[in-house]
Amino acid sequence: MPQARHLLLASAAVTGGLVLAAPATVAAAPADAPPTIVVENGMTQPVFSFADAIEERVYVETPLDTNHDGRRDRVAIDISRPRETATAGFKVPVIFEHSPYRKNVWGDVPYHSVLVDELPQNGPGRSGARSTGAGVQSAEAKANLPGSLDDYYVPRGYAVVLGQSVGTADSDGCSTSGDAAETLGTKAVIDWLNGRARGWDASGAPVTAGWTTGAVGMTGGSYNGTLPNQVATTGVEGLKTIIPVAAISSWYDYYRANGLVVAPGTYQGEDLDVLAKFTAGQARSEGDCADEMAAITGRQDRVTGDYSRFWAERDYLDARKVKASVFVVHGLNDWNVKTEHFAGWWDQLSKWHVPRKIWLHQGGHSNPSSAPVTLPNGQTWTYKQTENRWFDYWLWGVRNGVMSEPTAVVQRENAAYTTYRNWPDPGARDVAVRLAAPGSLTTGKTRGHTQQSFVDEGRTVHPDVLVANPDVPSPNRLAYTSPVLTGDVRISGRPEMRLRLAIDNKPGANLTAYLVDYGPPGSTAAPFVVTRGWMDPQNRRSADRSEPVRTGKLYDYRWTMQPKDYVFQAGHRIGVVVFSTDQEYTLLPLGGTRLRVATSDSEVRIPVVGGRSALGF
């Protein structure tokens, strides 16, 4: 998954359920009155002294022994809370961010080579795993301490807890990256906050959390946002809400795609074992935890790319036990933690009727911008204010109406935010857009049985070259464009590629498709890649089972591209580019693989708001 450098975001609030009833506004209290929060305009105000806050370190016992030393692992947590929680019996809810990136990461852990003579899934006897070049890369460490949670929320009447994942930093054990052990190590902190687990200070004295109401909200970005997703699926009591920002919902979808080994954006060669070693640090990875690291390397399977029990243990796409409310936040242009992570999780939350809200912005692997959104009632809020109000509602019980506001907030291409009833847009309908030779898209019928071929040279030809100049034939890809659009066309959801295709001279290949926004013919404007998708032809029936491909035989392949909400402007064209090896994401075999597409039996299904009539062709 991501490394600390590309996984770590500035912290974003994540919290849980209703605890205490509080009036929408609290007047200033007399000097001798017990402490209380102050709420104005539906938000808690910074009335508690941050300078006087109590800070403490606690070591929480987990039910784990990940390093097999015969003792239960303890995870380190750091706490900041208002002074009044000690002097006046004032109990507060907790905003909790857990992280594997606090300290001692392995900054130059070796990456896997992605240069292969043949794709490893092409079978035994081939040179699939042999590198033809120096493939070792290094990850640069970045500062990973979230700097603002305590500054912002302690003065507003919250405690903030910053935890260190099991097997990382000052916690015991071995890093296991995403499995049940990491989940239970995180859950133990919530149990301790609710009196169900033991904790000690640095001197070994027992410590309890009598200063909290027990209401916990989790927060964080990237890996730090993934941990809330993990723990929420356990249904742990006390976790009232989470706000996962740019968070993973399935580690298979992070490092694989429909049977292909696929990298997180710009981190070619990274895999789960690289991440585990990075977070554990070099001393642990090569010392007490060497066996655990070797097991991850063996079980992750960079040969077949198949979904397996190993990946199922790191899959959180089941919300049936989720009791916490969820505020999903994600960048529509995030190619690190790709958009399927928020969409797949959102589908599950919807299926199980979990209280939820979604905020999609135009950024990449980042927090939302500070641009305000205007609600239908005329009120205007920034993302940070909405985060604050969400915590206040679910942790302090402030009746601020946040749950009666539109479910979906989406930042449009011009940076302005707008609201929608839900996501994907309920008005979206899948429209079948057919590939028509030599290079056009149509919603009408196609005639004949035209086939078009191309040769994979993705190791040496960059995707930018393959996407450019769609009206000019290329031997290394197929490009198709729609007529010039007569009106704006919005898509909302998952485009799906359906190809009838043969691999003429190899037993396997990478399959890649891009959905692209092009200007009209002759335009000098640079094309924009709207979304991407990848597939292993050997996994045409299922991600968990590879099946041989007969050379020269046409098969039907279907795979979804990454979910998107995007507006193609009038005067532009919708484009589809089909090629094989994607230099930025897939393994890079030697060139020369020849692929053949039966265009009359191939199409892309696009989720168009308003359906075919809105598409205009």
Image: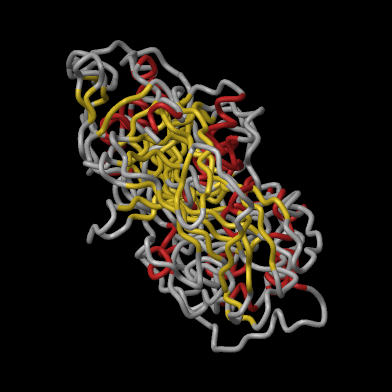
Dividing the picture into quarters, in which one does residue 465 lie? bottom left
The location of residue 210, given as percent across then percent down, is 49, 31
Could you tell me which residue is drawn at 38 percent across and 55 percent down? 529
Quarter the N terminus occupies: bottom right
As drawn, the residue found furthest toward the front would be 448
| Viewer-proximal residue among 244 and 568 | 568
Question: In the picture provided, is 68 more to the left or to the right than 598?
Answer: right
Q: Inspect this view and state whether residue 74 appears.
A: no
Where 164 falls versus 354 (above or below)? below
As drawn, the residue found furthest toward the bottom would be 133
The location of residue 557, given as percent across then percent down, is 67, 51
Way the structure is coloured = secondary structure
Question: In the picture provided, is 384 more to the left or to the right than 227?
Answer: left
The location of residue 509, given as percent across then percent down, is 66, 68
The location of residue 386, given as percent across then percent down, is 30, 29
Dividing the picture into quarters, in which one does residue 545 lie? bottom right
Could you tell me which residue is drawn at 51 percent across and 55 percent down? 437
Could you tell me which residue is drawn at 20 percent across and 33 percent down? 372
Report how many numbered discs are placed on residues in the image.
Answer: 0
